[in-house]
Amino acid sequence: MIPRYSRPEMATIWEPESRYRIWLDIEVLACEAQADLGVIPREAAREARKRGAFDIERIDEIEKETRHDVIAFLTSVAEHVGEPARFVHQGMTSSDVLDTCLAVQLTRAADILVADVDGLLAVLERRAREHKDTVCIGRSHGIHAEPTTFGLKLAGFYAEFQRNRERLEAARREVATCKLSGAVGTFANIDPRVEAYVAERLGLEPEPVSTQIVPRDRHAAFFATLGVVASSVERLATEIRHLQRTEVGEARESFSEGQKGSSSMPHKQNPILTENLTGLARVVRSAVVPALENVALWHERDISHSSVERTIAPDATVTLDFALARLTSVIEKLVVFPENMRRNLDALGGVIHSQRVLLALTRADVSREDAYAAVQDNAMKAVENGGGFLDLLKRDERVTGALGVAELEALFDLGYHTKHIDTIFKRVFGE
């Protein structure tokens, strides 16, 4: 985790203090369940609850010798609890603590990410409604296609992040799974009711069939979801970067007073935030392949997944949290230039209406092949020579033989392209 790209609430989840606090909660809850079952003395469970504590520096010191973090932790706890600590961790294996803790951390992280997406959705909806009727050119392959509206662009991103919210909720449910089933998952030395007790109090579900660990397909699905969300972040960021290009100039990131765009060129206003988001998306997606490779572990367990998760879990969640917050701010403050959008609409002399002319000719009994040839010839002339497309069509007998002047002119109405925007908005945002 890099402080530059971290926000406190998410970063705190992955700090040693938080991790060991969750470990202690798991151990104490397990003791209480064992006491309820008569496996350990009731007083031992009470002492674990009352006196249970740890010292991070002491854990680090012990681990240097034991080279085992859970044993170091349990030793530190025992130094606080005293003699009853011999009943702590009864029938459990290290992964009972580690995997259950990871489930808690990932669900907490998912809750923050869902809240992040909610914030972004609110801003996207507001800006989409603001520019619902702001007509701009739609592009395919980076080339002018037909008119759309800027609000419709944003509505499309809203719908995408609404799907991402659902994906995050599903990923959270899948990863909210714990195991306290012992060395190879058989419950040989611990009662399944202990697992159920701990799971309920931590807001988790017991893993139906565990080995020494929770199966890693769950985690792979979680990180794959983060990768999808990051790709959506990048797609919106890339759209803004293109719109900010000097030759386009339809929107740009806000540029605050005193901000500098270049050390050498004072005129520069660069899309640094959305470029940053593009890079951060790559970082989040870099966690996906290692998470997928963690699925295929040896037999009931090996630890090849451990080092991976200690890296990608904090890095991916912290980075995506930061990216979503930054993207929300970018959209909220985005500067939009409707006049430049109109200028770009007219840049090619009206050829963006070529499909309407084509369809009108076919309805006037002109074959599609002949209609296409006539429209394309005039469109190419308009693009290459800068002449008005409508004027060229009016001088082409192939066109005027089928369509009158008034009928031709009516085909260049921008309102034709926006007549169903309200219908689409109702699909996305409701009535």
Image: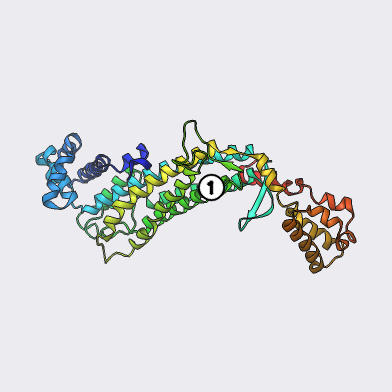
Q: How many marks?
A: 1
Residue 382 vs residue 1, the one in the foreground: 382
Which residue occupies the extreme left position in the image? 83
Q: Position of residue 149 (x, y in %)?
A: 66, 45
Q: Position of residue 24 (x, y in %)?
A: 22, 42
Residue at 34 percent of width and 48 percent of height: 315
Toward which corner of the image does residue 54 lie, by quadrant?
A: top left
Residue 160 vs residue 236, the one in the foreground: 236
Q: Position of residue 164 (x, y in %)?
A: 50, 49
Q: Is residue 213 left or right of residue 230?
A: left
Q: Quadrant of the N terminus?
A: top left
- The colour mode here is rainbow
Q: Is residue 164 left or right of residue 396?
A: left
Residue 96 vs residue 66, the one in the foreground: 66
Q: Quadrant of the C terminus?
A: top right
Can residue 261 be seen at all in this image of the molecule? yes
Residue at 46 percent of width and 37 percent of height: 260
Q: Position of residue 144 (x, y in %)?
A: 67, 54
Residue at 85 percent of width and 65 percent of height: 366
Can residue 40 be seen at all in this image of the molecule? no
Residue matched to label 1 = 241
Residue 308 vs residue 172, the one in the foreground: 308
